[in-house]
Each structure stands twice: as C-alpha cells, then as structure tokens.
Image (cartoon, grey):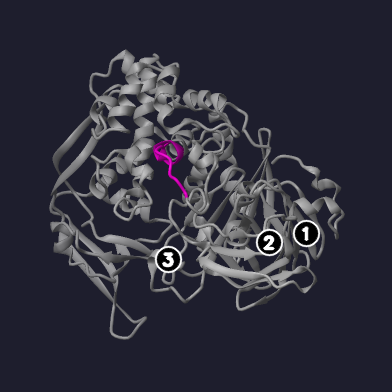
C-alpha cells in the first residue's frame, strides 16, 4: 500500500493533522450480543448538511447487500452540547445537520454471519466472505465495508483505525501501516477505497509467512477445533504460489499479500463457502473438516483469488476504478475480471506441473458443459455483465466461472495459433497491465479495440462475436488447433458402478448415497437406496483412503457376467441405527451417451503439436 504520513503518529494518541482524517475507535473487548461498538471523530466539516453512508455494495460481490442493515444505535453528538438532527434516508444513509457542529458519531455493528432477523429471506443473507463475523474473545472477521462508513463526497481522506482488543490478539491483513501493541493497535489507510479493499482477521495468532519471489505472503487461519492450521495451508499453497509467480513472469505486482481463512464448524447461513478477492488479500470462509480432504480445493480457490492481483488490481474499467458504493454501475467485462482469472488459476497449475493437461482439459470441458446446461448460452456476456444487478439477469452471474473460464481458454489457444506459439493470454494480460495499471482505468467500450491492437484482427472478431455478441463459442474449431477432437454427442457401452449420487459422511467416515434419481440400469439391479452407506465392494473396504484404488481395481478386472457385491449400512428405524445389507447383481455393460466429449486426434499435425506444447508447456 502507499506510504503516508501515518508513521509519525504517536501510538496511543493522534496528532493534530488528524483533523483532516477520519479517526475511528473500535472496541473489540466489550462485545454484547455479537455487536461491536464503533466511534468516529470525523474530519473537520464546513458544510451544514452531510449524508453519512454505509455501502450498498462493494467490488467483487456483484450483489446489492445494503450493509447499513447491520448498523444500530446510530447517534451523533454535537460540539458543546449542540443538538444534531439525524434522519435515516434509507438502509445505508443518514442525513446529518448541522454537520459543522458534529463532535462524534457512534454506532454498533452486528454480526452478519448469524444474525437471525432475516434468516428466511435468502436474498438478504450476505455471502460470508463479504460479511462480518463476531465471536467475543475468539475471533473477529472484519470486512471493513461492514464496519466503517464514509461521508458522501469525502472518500479521499486518510482513515485511522484504533482498535482496543483482547490481549495479544493480532490483526492479520494485507495492509502495511500497522502499529501493534498488546491491547491496542493503530491501522492507517490512504482512503475509503483502500479501506474497503482491506479486510482484517483478528484473533490470537495462527499465522505463517512465506516468501514468494519478491512478495511476503501472510497466511492467517482460524479453525475453532484446530482441524486446519496456517502451517498446513502455507505448505499446501507454496508450490502453487511459486507456479503462479512463474506464470506472471517471475515477479508479483505486490510486496505483501495476505490469505485470511476462517473454517466454519457448522453450515453457513448463506449455504455457500468460498472467498472474496481484494487487491492485497483474500478472505475465505470454508467448512472445518479434516485438512487431509481439502488440499486441492484450497489450491483451486486460492489460485483464483490470488490471480486477482492482475485483474482488477492492474486492469480495470472506470466503473471499478471509481466504484460508487451506493449507486454502483457494472462493467461489461466480467469475462476479464472473473473468467480470465478462473482460467488462469487452472492453467497455471497445469503449466507449473501441479496438475496435468488432462485435468486442465477435464475442468474446462466440465465448465463448458455447465455453461450449456445451467445458463443462457446465447446471452451476450458483456450484456450480462453490464446488467448483472437486474433480477432477471443476476441468475446468470455464476456463468462467469464457467463460460467465462472457457472464453479464456479459447482466447489463449487462438492467440497461440495465430502467433505460432509465441504469444498467449499471459502476454496479453501483461501488455494490458502495462498500458493501464492500478491507477489508470480503461473505458469499457475501448477494451476490445485495445486488445485487437495488441494482437490480431481475428481476436477482435472473436471477442465481438462470442463475448460481446450472441454466437456460441467455436469450441470445436478452437480445440482442433491443439489436436483435440470434439464430439457434440457420442454413444458407447461400458461397465459402471451404478451412478448413485455419493457424498462423504464425516460422522461415520463412509460414502453415503444422497440421490438415486440418475441411477443407470446396473444401479437399479443392485438396488441402491438413499441413505445407504458404502462399506465394501467385492469384499474390499471402501475407506476414504482406499476408495480410489478399490474403484480403479474394479474397472480394471470386471468382466461381463461377474457377480458384483456391495455391502452397505442401511438406515433402520431410530436415528443412528443401521442394518448391514449386501447388494448384488451381474455385471453388464450400460449404454452411455456422452455430450461434449473430447479425444486426442489420431493424425495430429506438427502445427497442432506446436500449439499444444506452447499452451501447456510440454
């Protein structure tokens, strides 16, 4: 972050220069009913009337949340006992007058993670990585936009935050201007945009710091039952971060970055888990399960969020660079901010040798399939992005992680084909970051033209037709350029496991049948039922540690007519009671209809080999 004059501040007092600043005081010691008391001494004001605002929305969420709903006991004191008028205009806005007589503003901040008054209204539940978590004497998840307001028209002032905290609590954050003590900390931020961009995780420290190239990476973790540690996360991410650094040219565009993790011991109110990206950090809420089972999920989620140091940090439109927290305008280019980021997260792992080209292609084709089956494939992606806050359009948002990533793959392969393998999306993003950067925004309408100037007319046509227009992605033609055949539909006859919908049940450490609606004929012969917990397959135990090998052996040795046996624990009567039952059926091949299937071409050309090698670094 930018260095400022905050270093001259005394630790326990703020000098007279703070008259131009927002001076916030936050009490994390006296917490009542999951509410934190906040006091503000505002900058000197000359106007008679102001609007004091909390955000309706913040960058990265793509949904109106109205964070002011979680503010209560809002009071304003006047200088020398002056009466101050306060009118609440809407969920997020308080009109205050006379503003030039304000002495201090105070209010309470509620916990969005477990607030009950709107529990039935799912549209109002805030996605946890963008909300506030308050657990007295244990943990404070401070997404700053949920704690701190601003005076409309006055966001470009310094914000000085003084925290009174439980003894030895540590503020993990991507910020650098921090003065820490045993019971008080002072954190300084350049302006409101940087403040909102900087979550803080407060707790007794479980932190690990690693060096990735030129960047100091902080990992902070809160796992109530100690199932996950920051050391485990750091060890899991170190190879990934090294691969991402190489992917970006060996040098990262930030000096410090923070991964802030909260592991939830029970399901979240929103029913979702994930993360919210920031320029210098990312905030995660994930289920608290044994760390053995979450390695790849950690890598995939962290890889995506970390790559946001490219977009939107160094490549963004004016709608993001000048974000309006209470009347937000959306950019057309979610394909760039989220789609390209999701693609790069998977592509970097393949190029870095963490996963394989087969895994990369499998992930991309699954996303392609999801985009066709779950979303409107003919909707203009730029049109969807621009109007994503509209109720009729918002359900299409998650396609940014599906079709958006496939757009990135198509663009990368097309660029490499046109340049004989010398130029891809890695080069393009670097060129765009050089043209723009953190402090320079592009015009939405200019982006396709700018990309075309860096690349080829064919790329401009691809973007206008398949991203800005309504034409489906030319997936068959694109994959052909790397020697991959694509079939819209293919039929084969193969052995199966019955295709029950399975999940892992932590209480019994067994796989459990969650649904039988997609059972094939062999599954029906076996007689799976919902709730069956799998114990053995042909006498071999189906433990989590062995299940992959047991299933692999099953497919390697199965023959037509073999008697297949599966032992299951079937729920019986009272909760927690089971009956051991053996399911059996004769093995037979089942008709399999696959859609959007890919395979390596039999007669791959030298040019196709060249582009494939360039694409995945073979």
Location of the N terminus by quadrant is: top right
Q: Earlier in the sequence, mark 2 or mark 1?
A: 2
The residue mark sitting in front, 2 or 1, is: 2
Say above or below: 359 vs 119. Answer: above
Which residue, given by chain and number where applicable, does mark 2 sit on? 99
In magenta stretch: residue 329: yes
| Mark 1 closeness class: few <14, some 14–19, many ≥20 residues within 10 Å | many
In the image, taking residue 138 as reference, residue 80 lies left or right, namely right
Residue sitting at 52 percent across and 33 percent down? 315
Q: Position of residue 496 (x, y in %)?
A: 21, 52
Measured Cα–Cα span from mark 2 to mark 3: 32 Å
Q: The residue tagged with tag 3: helix, strand or loop?
A: helix
Say above or below: 363 vs 497. Answer: above
Q: The residue tagged with tag 2: helix, strand or loop?
A: helix
Which residue, given by chain and number where applicable, does mark 3 sit on? 124
Q: Position of residue 515 (x, y in %)?
A: 25, 65
In the image, taking residue 186 as reference, residue 363 lies left or right, namely left
Region of the chain picked out in magenta, as a range: 328-341
């Amino acid at each position: 972050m930018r260095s400022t004059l905050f270093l001259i501040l005394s630790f326990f007092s703020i000098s007279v220069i703070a008259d131009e600043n927002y001076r916030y005081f936050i009490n994390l010691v006296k917490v009542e009913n999951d509410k934190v008391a906040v006091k503000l001494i505002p900058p000197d004001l000359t106007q008679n009337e102001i609007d004091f605002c909390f955000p309706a929305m913040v960058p990265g969420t793509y949904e109106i949340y109205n964070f002011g709903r979680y503010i209560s006991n809002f009071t304003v004191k006047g200088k020398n006992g002056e009466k101050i008028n306060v009118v609440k205009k809407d969920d997020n806005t308080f009109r205050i007058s006379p503003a030039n007589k304000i002495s201090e503003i105070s209010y309470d901040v509620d916990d969005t993670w477990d607030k009950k008054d709107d529990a039935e209204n799912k549209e109002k539940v805030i996605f946890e990585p963008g909300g506030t978590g308050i657990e007295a004497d244990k943990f404070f998840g401070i997404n700053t936009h949920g704690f701190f307001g601003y005076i409309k028209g006055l966001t470009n002032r310094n914000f000085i935050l003084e925290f009174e905290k439980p003894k030895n609590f540590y503020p993990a954050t991507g910020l650098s201007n921090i003065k820490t003590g045993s019971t008080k900390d002072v954190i300084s931020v350049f302006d409101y945009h940087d403040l909102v961009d900087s979550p803080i995780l407060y707790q007794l420290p479980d932190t690990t710091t690693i060096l990735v190239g030129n960047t100091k990476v902080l990992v902070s973790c809160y796992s109530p039952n100690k199932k996950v540690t920051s050391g485990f996360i750091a060890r899991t991410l170190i190879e990934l971060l090294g691969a991402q650094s190489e992917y970006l040219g060996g040098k990262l565009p930030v000096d410090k970055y923070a991964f802030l993790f909260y592991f939830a011991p029970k399901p979240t109110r929103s029913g979702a888990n994930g993360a919210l990206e920031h320029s210098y950090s990312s905030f995660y809420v994930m289920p608290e399960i044994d760390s053995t089972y979450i390695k790849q999920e950690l890598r995939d989620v962290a890889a995506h969020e970390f790559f946001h140091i490219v977009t939107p940090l160094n490549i963004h439109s004016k709608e993001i660079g000048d974000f309006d927290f209470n009347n937000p305008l959306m950019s057309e280019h979610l394909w760039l901010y989220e789609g390209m980021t999701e693609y790069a997260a998977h592509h970097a792992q393949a190029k870095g040798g963490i996963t394989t080209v087969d895994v990369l292609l499998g992930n991309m084709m699954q996303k392609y399939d999801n985009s066709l089956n779950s979303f409107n494939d003919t909707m203009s992606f730029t049109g969807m992005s621009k109007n994503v806050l509209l109720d009729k359009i918002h359900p299409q948002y998650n396609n940014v992680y599906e079709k958006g990533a496939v757009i990135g793959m198509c663009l990368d392969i097309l660029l490499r084909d046109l340049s004989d393998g010398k130029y891809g999306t890695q080069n393009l993003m670097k060129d765009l970051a050089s043209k723009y950067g953190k402090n320079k925004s592009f015009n939405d309408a200019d982006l396709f033209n700018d990309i075309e100037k860096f690349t080829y007319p064919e790329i401009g046509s691809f973007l206008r037709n398949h991203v800005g227009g309504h034409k489906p992605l030319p997936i068959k033609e694109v994959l052909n350029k790397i020697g991959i055949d694509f079939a819209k539909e293919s039929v084969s006859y193969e052995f199966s496991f019955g295709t029950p919908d399975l999940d892992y049940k932590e209480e019994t450490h067994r796989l459990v049948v969650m649904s039988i609606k997609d059972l094939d004929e062999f599954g029906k012969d076996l007689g799976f039922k919902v709730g069956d917990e799998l114990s053995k397959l042909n006498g071999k135990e189906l433990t989590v540690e062995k299940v992959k090998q047991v299933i692999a052996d099953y497919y390697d040795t199965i023959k037509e007519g073999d008697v297949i046996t599966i032992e299951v624990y079937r729920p019986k009567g009272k909760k927690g009671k089971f009956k051991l039952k053996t399911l059996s059926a004769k093995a037979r091949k089942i008709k399999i209809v696959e859609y959007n299937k890919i395979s390596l071409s039999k007669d791959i050309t030298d040019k196709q080999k060249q582009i494939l090698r360039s694409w995945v670094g073979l």
